[in-house]
Image (tube, grey):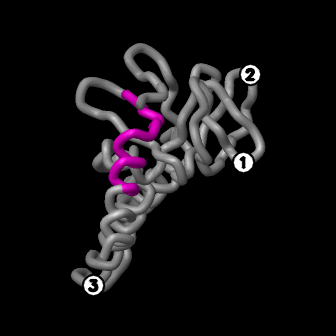
Amino acid sequence: MKVLVFLILSSFFTDCFSQKLLFHKNRYREVLYRIGDVISFQLEGNENRITDQIRGFEDSLIVFQYFEINPDKITHLYIDDKTRTWYVLRYKYEKILPIAGAGYLFLDLLNTGKLEKNTLVISGSLMAAGLLSRWLISRRIKFKGSRKLMIIE
């Protein structure tokens, strides 16, 4: 029983009093990254995407397995499960539009029994818009204005 109480209290204190990485987008949207979370980002002067698990924090540095980095050096953050909830439909277009196009084509074919040019144009446009949205909608959040990445205690 004492061991169970110790484990519960130690996990509470390490979570409450350990440092965390805060991504502040605006007044209403903030995300906390803790030790063990995977984060994808881009550094200034580098076009490559870096994805790694956070191992810890030291003063003003984020510690990863093979390197440490200052949050001020990160210029872009990639969308993950924590930040995806901010955008209701933005990253669902690539899935919704092709399904809507195929569904429209199927239902019109089922109703009329033949393929019409207008139906093909509309359903093809919906499918093409879904494919284009995959390339046109960026998955990066650039740090500018009120967007900040900082280590908090």
**Residue pictured at 42% horizontal, 64% vertical:** 98
Q: Residues within 10 Å of mark 2 (few under 14, many from 20)?
A: few
Q: Residues within 10 Å of mark 1 (few under 14, many from 20)?
A: few
| Residue denoted by label 3 | 110
| Residue denoted by label 2 | 45
Q: CA distance from mark 1 to mark 2?
A: 22 Å
For residue 100, say whether it is visible.
Answer: yes
Q: Which residues are magenta?
A: 10-24
> Furthest residue to the front?
2
Name the front one of labels 1 and 2. 1
For residue 132, say whether it is visible.
Answer: no
Residue 40 within the segment the image draws in magenta:
no
Say if mark 1 contacts mark 2, CB within 8 Å. Answer: no
**Residue pictured at 24% horizontal, 30% vertical:** 28
Residue 126 % position (x, y): 39, 57
Mark 3 residue element: helix
Q: Residues within 10 Å of mark 3 (few under 14, many from 20)?
A: few
User: What type is the residue that disc 3 sits on?
Assistant: Leu
Horizontal side, residue 1 vs residue 145: left or right: left
User: What type is the residue that disc 1 sits on?
Assistant: Gln
Q: Earlier in the sequence, mark 3 or mark 2?
A: 2
Mark 1 residue element: loop
Q: CA distance from mark 3 to mark 2?
A: 55 Å
Query: Is residue 91 placed above or below 44 in the rendered structure?
Result: below
